[in-house]
Amino acid sequence: MAALLISEAQMNSKQMKEILYLATLNTKKAFDVVNHDILLDKLFQRDIPLDIWETIYEMYHDLTSRINWKGKYSTSFPIRQGVRQGGILSTNFYKAYIEDLLIQLEESNVGLHLGTNYSGCPTCADDILLLSNSDEDMQVMLNTVNTYSKDHQYTIHPTKSVLLKQNQTSSNSGKVTLSAWELGNRAITTSDQATHLGLTRSSKNENLINVDERISLARRTSYSLMKTGVHGTNGLNPRVSYNIYTEYIYCLVSFTV
């Protein structure tokens, strides 16, 4: 759905002959820097059942760890941040951790709207992207993100985060007032391409780039599956091979197209 919103924003901006600004944000070790006290407070405010909250509290309160090196253990040290790697609830915890940022962006009324619907920050977990038809609004959104990250004790890489412009023409380039954007006190990288949710967003030839990448990925996947018996001679049952092809290869191409 987040990827679909971006594609709709691109189509809408093209029809309206407006520049579309996209900023992909790279959070430094996003899941590893979730502050436990802030997370528990946010979960408590969501009015989840008390017994469930207490269970989560026991999972993340007063954690300690030790280093095992050559059969010897170090002194215990506290762990006050980070959600469990591979944990079933970890992604949901991170969503709860940054939800207030998305709410702040929407309530500020800056960023892209599709009709009456706010679509300025299509996000999936830590894959945050900002959308705007105004360069000044984009800077306001970046300021909001920077302030929130400081308050919640995590860092966004300004050099690894990328901002790009789409649909810029001679007729609308006069509306541009900013030549650079900042995240905190550092300039954010500007580029012709950025990756978000596995798709390449580009200032030109975006569809061709993604189709070529998906075909290449599907080809590599097809060759790797041959070792499991997905081939024409003495392999898996043809019906099974067809189902595997449909699920793991065909979908890679059709998703982009």
Image: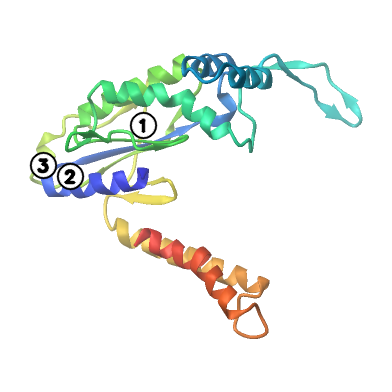
Is residue 173 visible in the rendered image? The answer is yes
Residue at which label 3 appears: 172
* x and y percentages locating residue 174 in the rendered image: 10, 37
In the rendered image, the quadrant that contains the N terminus is top left
**Amino acid carrying mark 2 in the image:** Ser
Q: How crowded is mark 2: few (under 14 residues within 10 Å), some or many (20 or more)?
A: many
C-alpha gap between disc 1 and disc 2: 23 Å
Residue 29 visible at all: no
Comes first in the chain, label 3 or label 2 = 2
Q: Distance between the residues labelled 3 and 1?
A: 23 Å
| Comes first in the chain, label 3 or label 1 | 3
- The secondary element bearing badge 1 is classed as loop
Residue at x 14% of width, y 42% of height: 18
x and y percentages locating residue 95 in the rendered image:
47, 30
Residue 227: give x, y in percent of width and height: 67, 72
Q: Position of residue 162 (x, y in %)?
A: 37, 38
Single out the residue that lies furthest toward the right: 71
Give the class, few, some or many, for how many residues have Cα within 10 Å of label 1's Cα (few <14, many ≥20).
Answer: many
Relative placement, left or right, of 131 versus 158 is left
